[in-house]
Amino acid sequence: MSSVLYDAQGPRAKRRNILYTVSFIVAAAAVVWWVYAALNEKHQLDWVLWKPFFSSEAYTAYLWPGLRNTLKAAALAMIIALPLGAVLGIARLSDHVWVRVPATVVVEFFRAIPVLVLMIFGNELYSQYTDVSSDDRPLYAVVTGLVLYNASVLAEIVRAGILALPKGQSEAAMAIGLRKNQVMRLILLPQAVTAMLPAIVSQLVVIVKDTALGGAVLTYPELLASANPMTGYYGANTIASFTVIALIYVIINFSLTSFASWLERRLRRRKKSSGAVLGAQDVADIAGTASTGTAA
């Protein structure tokens, strides 16, 4: 039986796929066993190394303060970078050269610089030219670097999402008398948000993970930076510490992507269920409202 996209597999193809599947499972099991044997040989799986993570002390004293700082920096960066990226992305689509060119320069400049360099630059900037205390300076530097870099990337996501819409959308809106800012605000952006959502969430995940750069270079006490004092306090449990921290990152980012998937499905269902047929009088009313700038 065939479909539009591909032909149904024959007996030889089915046997070959079964062979590939079995081979992959065997290879994966061999790798897992090799990792287990290597860790066990180095006594990294001994209970004494993992015992601290089954008590509340490791979480309240080390992991939770680091996680709180990670979420604080990531949340501040998201709150600032999302609207700033949207503004820059829309500005790059402007018909006015004096708006489009500066926005393009800003986006291309900060998108080309590694986020770590921006963090270091921000730290030196706050140290030399501001009164920010040394305790707060790492947080300011981390948020500044994340905002500058990720706002530039989000601006490109917004611009690409708007340009991906059919040109007839804006032409139809202008045909009924909507101004360009109304077309962008009422027609293009609501449709582009659903399409842009997966890419935006992927960038938000990057923001969460990049907070670790501040801990590695600027001594910002985020989640990953808690591994060193925790290892020193409990002894040689480095692998156990990093394993638990990695699982926390996985839980955070999986929760974020799951929420985004749920939101995307909800937006798509609402868009499908909210369709309405407009009559001639409705179109005339919309055109009159757009031209006069007043609500009915």
Image (tube, rainbow, N blue to C red):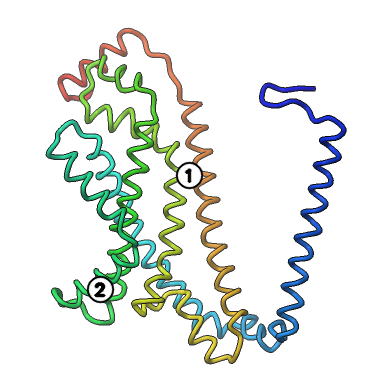
The part of the image, by quadrant, that contains residue 28 is: bottom right
Q: Nearer the viewer, residue 65 or 151?
A: 151
Question: Horizontal placement of 46 versus 291: left or right?
Answer: right
All told, the count of numbered labels is 2
Q: In the displayed orientation, state which residue is furthest to the top.
A: 280
Q: Secondary structure at mark 2?
A: helix
The residue that mark 1 highlights is: 198
Amino acid type for the residue under numbered disc 1: Pro
Residue 158 in which image quadrant: top left
Nearer the observer, 229 or 285:
229
Type of amino acid under label 2: Asn
Q: Which label lies toward us, 2 or 1?
A: 2
Q: Residue at x 52, y 91 (%)?
A: 232
Residue, disc 2: 123
Position of residue 230 measured from the top left corner of the image (x, y, whole percent): 52, 86
On screen, residue 274 versus residue 51, left or right, reads: left
Quadrant location of the C terminus? Answer: top left
- Vertical side of 220 occupied by 76: above or below: above
Answer few, some or many: residues within 10 Å of disc 1's Cα (few below 14, many 20 plus, some between 14 and 19). some
Cα distance between the residues tagged 2 and 1: 31 Å
Q: Give the residue at x 30% y 9%.
A: 281
Q: Whole-percent x and y of residue 52? A: 62, 85
- Residue 3 vertical position relative to residue 56 in the rendered view, above or below: above
Q: Secondary structure at mark 1?
A: helix
Side of 235 relative to 112 (left or right): right
- Residue 294 screen position, x and y as percent: 18, 24
Q: Residue at x 35, y 50 (%)?
A: 153
Quick one: label 2 or label 1, which is nearer the N terminus?
Answer: 2
